[in-house]
């Protein structure tokens, strides 16, 4: 699927949204992970470019990458998506590691991607065994505080898992590639909303605006975790 197939729509009632921001004087206290997510989004927006031309070029790049069925391009798209959503995101190096890892303080989301191949082919037992082993890599190679959590998500076009993989599929999650592409599109629209109401010289105001928008759009880190953890892999059988 090419990014040109996406219909980018303007936010609804943007003037009302801006008015709401200006009228509300207080923002509820937020948890540390959400605060880090917001700070990271501020930095990402600066990296994407303040000029509309540069910003749009970077947004198109994200959509082109994540809509690609080329493994390397897709993985890069997932990495960039994590960053623009306010996570630390990396592609670990090596053959026996997860494809992409998102981190926010003591919360880790690991992704194994499989966008090539036949959609009807099941997720096999060997894949699941390898993925469980990848969790240890995160614990051994990344800052891993006490009490940290790791959730692993398989991104693929597959819609079933094989019977012999059921015992290995517990605690693993699955999301269809088409769904994460929808998240990417929603994220780019959200970023446009944020830029349209930014008061660039007031950092506190920027953070309040981002807080309200990601909450309204259900793109806080908690919303994202819930979305990725909706489908248990063993439920695909």
Image (cartoon, rainbow, N blue to C red):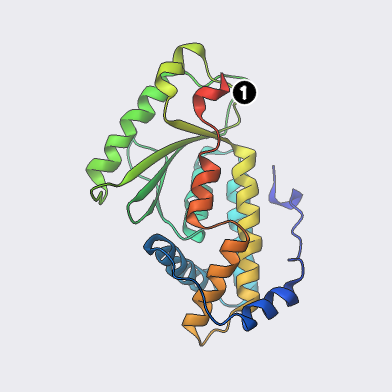
> Going by the image, does 19 lie left or right of 231?
right
Image spot of residue 33 (x, y percent): 39, 60
The C terminus: image quadrant: top right
Q: Is residue 61 visible?
A: yes
In this rendering, the answer to whether 33 lies above or below 43 is above
Q: What residue is shown at x 28% (from left), y 38% (from top)? A: 137
Which is more toward the observer, 179 or 61? 179
**How many labels, in total?**
1
Which is more toward the observer, 113 or 237? 237
In this rendering, the answer to whether 35 lies above or below 128 is below
> Going by the image, does 162 lie left or right of 60?
left
Image spot of residue 203 (x, y percent): 47, 82
Q: What residue is shown at x 43% (from left), y 70% (from top)? A: 39
In this rendering, the answer to whether 162 lies above or below 58 is above
Dividing the picture into quadrants, the one containing residue 92 is top left
Q: What residue is shown at x 58% (from left), y 21% (from top)? A: 160
Q: Is residue 58 visible?
A: no
> Residue tagged by mark 1?
118
The N terminus: image quadrant: top right
Image spot of residue 223 (x, y percent): 53, 51
Image spot of residue 63 (x, y percent): 62, 53
Q: Residues within 10 Å of mark 1 (few under 14, many from 20)?
A: few
| Residue farthest toward the top in the current orientation of the protein | 164
Secondary-structure class at tag 1: loop
Q: What residue is shown at x 62% (from left), y 46% (from top)? A: 181
């Amino acid at each position: 699927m090419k990014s040109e197939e996406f219909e980018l729509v303007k936010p609804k009632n943007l003037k009302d949204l801006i008015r709401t921001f200006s009228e509300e004087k207080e923002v509820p206290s937020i948890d540390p992970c959400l605060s880090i997510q917001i700070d990271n989004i501020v930095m990402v927006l600066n990296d994407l470019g303040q000029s509309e031309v540069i910003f749009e070029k970077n947004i198109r790049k994200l959509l082109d990458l994540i809509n690609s069925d080329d493994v390397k391009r897709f993985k890069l798209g997932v990495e960039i998506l994590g960053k623009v959503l306010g996570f630390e995101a990396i592609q670990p190096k090596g053959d026996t590691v997860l494809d992409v890892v998102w981190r926010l303080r003591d919360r880790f989301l690991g992704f194994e991607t499989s966008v090539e191949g036949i959609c009807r082919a099941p997720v096999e037992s060997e894949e699941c065994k390898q993925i469980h082993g990848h969790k240890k890599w995160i614990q051994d190679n990344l800052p891993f505080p006490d009490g940290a959590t790791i959730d692993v998500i398989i991104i693929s076009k597959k819609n079933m898992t094989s019977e012999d993989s059921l015992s290995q599929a517990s605690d693993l999650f699955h999301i269809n590639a088409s769904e994460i592409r929808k998240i990417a599109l929603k994220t780019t629209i959200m970023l446009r909303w944020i830029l349209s109401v930014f008061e660039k010289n007031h950092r506190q105001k920027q953070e309040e605006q981002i807080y309200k928008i990601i909450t309204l759009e259900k793109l806080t880190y908690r919303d994202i975790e819930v979305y990725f953890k909706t489908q248990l892999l063993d439920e695909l059988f």
